[in-house]
Image (cartoon, rainbow, N blue to C red):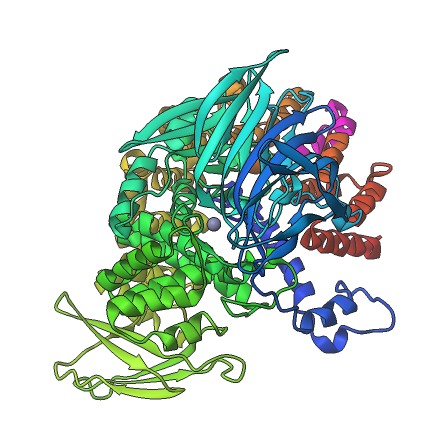
Amino acid sequence: MNQKLNCPKQKGSSFFLYLLLGLASIYFQACKSSATMPSDTAITAEGTADDLLDPTTFWAEEETPPYQPSATRTMDIVHMDLDLRFDWKVQQVLGTARLKMTPFFSPQKTVVLDAKDFEFESVYLLQGEKKELLSYRYDEKQLTLYFPNEVNPKDTLTVEVSYTAFPERNSGEGSAAITDTKGLYFIDPLDTLPSKATMLWTQGETEHNSKWFPTLDRPNERFTHSISLTVPDTMVSISNGRLVRQEPKENGMRTDYWEMNLPHAPYLVAIAVGNFGKVESSYKNIPLAYYVEKGYEPGAAKVFERTPQMMAYFESLLKTPFPWPKYDQIVVRDYVSGAMENTTASIFMEELLLDEREALDSEWDYIVAHELFHQWFGDLVTAESWSNLTLNEAFANYSEYLWTAHQEGQDDAAMKLITEMEGYFSEAESKQVDLIRFNYADAEDMFDAHSYNKGGVVLHMLRRHLGDEAFFKGLTLYLNTHAFGSVEAHDLRLALEKVSGQDLNWFFNQWFFDKGHPELDIEVDYSQPENILVTLTQVQDTYEGPVFQLPIPLSWYQEGERFTRTFLMSEVTQQLALENQVPIEQLYIDEGQEFLAKKSQSFTSAQYLRQYKESQLGIARYEALDSLVSRSASEELKEILPLAMKDTFWSIRERALRVLQSDISWKDSLPELEEQVFALGDQDTKNEVKAAAIDVLTEWNPDAYQNAFQRWVRHPSYLVAGAALMGLAYGKDPAMPLDYMVSFEKETNYRMRVPLAEYYLMNKVKGKGAWFDSALKSMEGVGLYYFMGYYTSYFSEFPEEGKAEAVTFLLGLLRSHSKDYVRLGAFQSLLSFTEEPGVLESLEKASEVEKSEDLKNYFSYFLEMFDEEN
Ligand SMILES: [Zn+2]
């Protein structure tokens, strides 16, 4: 699974970045402050304003969560036949499941199936032609079947269960509005929302498929299956395996027969039904299809374009063919996560629903790679329990790095790795746990930056330690040994040990079975340049976590040539004598930033300047620039910025431009750069860089570039065109004529709508209420989030144009939008309208029923502040 975005990510940022960062940092601070409350203030007799945190929750979290063993296997499902029909009106699933089962090891008299919120019509034991009623017991979550006789492990039996499933019921979870455990989701089932397509889709991970078929819902089970789906003839169905047959039925219905003849785990079973368009492709003899809402096929062809190349690349790395008979990728609405690796049928969130032009700036390769890699790691070889989840997610996460390195090059990949590390470090501030952990409160807790980010980086370090050949050969052995089976971390260790001949217990013990990360104090003594001394100290808490054994890569440059050496660190404090003989002026420790450690070393600005100038690694040059920016080293920056704008690594060019944009004084201190900025806007090969350059020109001197902006606004990339339109909006002398700007009202992408909104607001253009209104109502996701602030400003400025309706609409978003960050945006917006009668009360009510804990804390924090002020 790929986690959903909690807050929108911004790439090739622009003016709107500030808006986002403002919101996001307040958001995260608010959330963090509640999570890191010191313990001595946690319990007070009366809840004061400090007590965002419920003290009982605080102490409960201190206790060790329960031990979660792998599921005991008593019965094994061998095959499932499933017939499904759907009552769209009442959102129910009408099903018949025939389960062929056998005892796993010892004779059995019963089986306990997971079946959440079902009603049963009949339960039979099938014996040839004969059907015998079975006695059963049901408690809303599990169905216990009593066999007439004890069944021996050599025997199989088939039961037939006819049922109605109610995905909308939540008997197991009380009355709380839990939205991501339905298993099966009907979207706009009665087709009442013009902006939404009617469809249904499923999300099984972790144990939610037993909301729509009875099964042994745990990852160490696996079976083959046939699924027949009776759907309206106008709709398309997709499921695992192959579509083998379609039969027309009465009343405009049709039955599709899907066959999955290779075994896989129950949580990977999936269906999707809707009025989808289909883009076909292939890799070798494997059919590929991308399913999206009709009209988006050209965009999907681009978003998923590189799937065949990815398959070829992953096959070549893993020396293991793609294991399944076909691969479909489906984009759905209102998805509860980022994406899910259902075997042969990955499902993605609607952020991947792009038109052809939007797809030019698509940044979704990483998620496509992630789900694809899962088809080997997760689907073919499956973590035996959620405690071992990283065996699925570390690999999927690392595939994003692998693909980036292959497709975009080493600099981009290094940047990706840093982003992953930062994700982990940020979580590690409040949570440090073992990667493999058998104690957790809820299986969903395993889907964190440990299982994903840290896991991926740990695999990278393992690869660097073993070398590419041993690492990938080990993976091949692991996949072949455990194909169609369940694994735990030792299976991976043993495969890598077998291939490499090395003991790897030390590596697995510290990285998989222990917590934390090294925090290194680094001192480099240059007093004898021909024998440099490096003193390293691990300053992390070695009572709670391990003293790490670490390979320390050292590097330096002599006359443009790069030299490297690696030392092994295994003690708390260690001194390395480099015995370099030829004098070294500057030494780098982990120059490529490839290991997971917090490093602290005093580095002067002059040393960073040198690092920028001599390093052959893009990531090290980026680090140098970034460090100088954060310490506002203007003298060094003055020297670096002109070089950075010509750097071969595009992220550095973009970063340099963002520096120029952020502080207008650079215009006076580096006036000669303006020409270079213009050239980047005009000619850079990366649209992100072009857009950043255009933003600088807008900031520095918009009037001088109106002609160029008019040219660039016709660029096919919305990144570029949107930046240019912002430049046009900022023109003052003369301002762009209203007529010209109005001609962009037909644009639907938020990157175009935001500058237009900015123009209307800056120039106080009246009569645009209808445009703001219809624009906001047709937007989704990130675009909706960004646009909401402008919408709010406009109706605050011109209330007569429909403020009351705007407030009503925002309240609707706050109450019912499925995305956290959209509800956050709506809340923020509504804070501007608290003088309106009833708004404050509505905010308080929304805060009470908010289902995200983080948002709830944030809302109540703001409302309390608000109360205090008034
Ligand atoms: Zn995943």
Above or below, 212 against 106 in this view is: above
Query: Who is closer to the viewer here, 471 or 516?
Result: 471
At 54% from the left and 39% from the top, the residue drawn is 80
Above or below, 526 against 608 in this view is: below
Magenta stretch?
788-806
Instruction: Residue 106 in the image: state x and y as whole percent.
Output: 56, 60
Outermost residue on the top side: it is: 251
Query: Who is closer to the viewer here, 32 or 279?
Result: 279
Instruction: Residue 477 in the image: state x and y as whole percent.
Output: 30, 59
Left or right, residue 598 beside residue 26: left
Locate residue 231: give its quadrant.
top right
Instruction: Residue 262 in the image: state x and y as whole percent.
Output: 42, 41
Locate residue 459: give its quadrant.
bottom left
Residue 186 in view (yes/no): yes
At 24% from the left and 47% from the top, the residue drawn is 316
At 21% from the left and 83% from the top, the residue drawn is 578
Query: Who is closer to the viewer here, 535 or 162?
Result: 162
Residue 804 in the magenta stretch? The answer is yes
Above or below, 104 against 729 in this view is: below
Instruction: Residue 744 in the image: state x and y as whole percent.
Output: 50, 21
Above or below, 706 against 463 in this view is: above
